[in-house]
Amino acid sequence: NTDQFFACFEEVSGVSLEQFKQGWLYQIGYPRVTADTSWERGTGCFRIHFAQVLASGQAPFQIPIEIALVASNGKDVAGSARVFQLTQATGEAVYENLSAPPAFASLNRDYSYYGTFHWQNGSQDDLVHQVRLDPNAYNRVEAMRQLADHQRLALLRDPEAPVDERWLSLYGELLADEGLPNALKAYLLRIEEQPLAREYCTWFEELVRARETLMRAVNERYRRQLVSRFDRLDTYTLPSNRSPRYGIEERLLKHVVLDLIAIDDSAESHQLILDHF
């Protein structure tokens, strides 16, 4: 039965899973976690304060949150990677005696748990650093999604708002990065249809317009680079020593790039599509 199932894991790990079991199996809802970070220059202390957003009468979940501090060279600060167990309504991870502040905190790596997470005082600069430097691929993509969502929300509030030049420059930087694996580049470049801010999920027409505005801005700035990238992605040749997964990442990136090219609905784009297919 269920209790025996959990007892097996408790026996091997030496950890009680009673709170985990009660929260995840017998309680309605899912975790919603926020985080605030702070650096104390005088003490060399970096703090990450976590809080669960709980409904009235709801007990705290037991939540494993994978975290690390990242230095300006794009590597984890030595010894900073850990899994923080948030078992109460609030909790704090503390790093002491640091010789210098980290470039940023990499939080909720690899989508540590099922639920929502929001870094409340993470700035646009922090997210840009994270896109460029975070060793964790999931968090690089998540940071880029948040930056794109910031642009999307500005367009939802004002359809005539300009697309931020810094976001466009970062986009071009990622497009030009030859060191990025194809799948990671695809996820970084993809402009999604749905917003991260759930209160806007039913703004259907406005969301379509906002996404098209962002894609057109990318097309107008980087069309030549997009077409070049599309042409260099070989999804036709099948080498004799191919693996069963051969071509999946290439096709994923090619689809993302084609979406960005075809947004202009031009005769040139139509012919590119016909030639490809």
Image: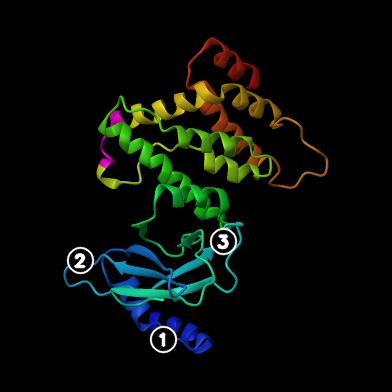
- Amino acid tagged 1: Ser
Residue 194 seen in this snapshot? no
User: What distance separates the C-alpha of mark 3 from that of mark 1?
Assistant: 35 Å
Q: Residue at x 38, y 41 (%)?
A: 149
**From what the image shows, is residue 45 above or below residue 73?**
below
Q: Secondary structure at mark 3?
A: loop
Nearer mark to the viewer, of 3 and 1 = 3
Range of residues picked out in magenta: 200-206
Q: Secondary structure at mark 1?
A: loop
Along the viewing direction, whichever of 100 and 125 lies nearer the viewer = 100
Q: Residue at x 47, y 22 (%)?
A: 263
Residue 71 is marked as: 3
Q: Please state if 117 lies on the left or on the right of 167 as rendered.
A: left
Report which quarter residue 226 is drawn in: top right
Q: Residue at x 29, y 26 (%)?
A: 159
Q: Is residue 202 magenta?
A: yes
For marks 2 and 1, the one nearer the N-term is: 1
User: What distance separates the C-alpha of mark 3 from that of mark 2?
Assistant: 37 Å
Q: Residue at x 46, y 28 (%)?
A: 215
**From what the image shows, is residue 44 above or below residue 151?**
below
- Residue 17 point in image, percent of width and height: 40, 82
For marks 3 and 1, the one nearer the N-term is: 1
Q: Please state if 65 lies on the left or on the right of 208 as rendered.
A: right
Nearer mark to the viewer, of 3 and 2 = 3
Q: Tell me the residue that label 1 is attached to.
A: 16
Q: Tell me the residue that label 2 is attached to.
A: 55
- Amino acid tagged 2: Ala
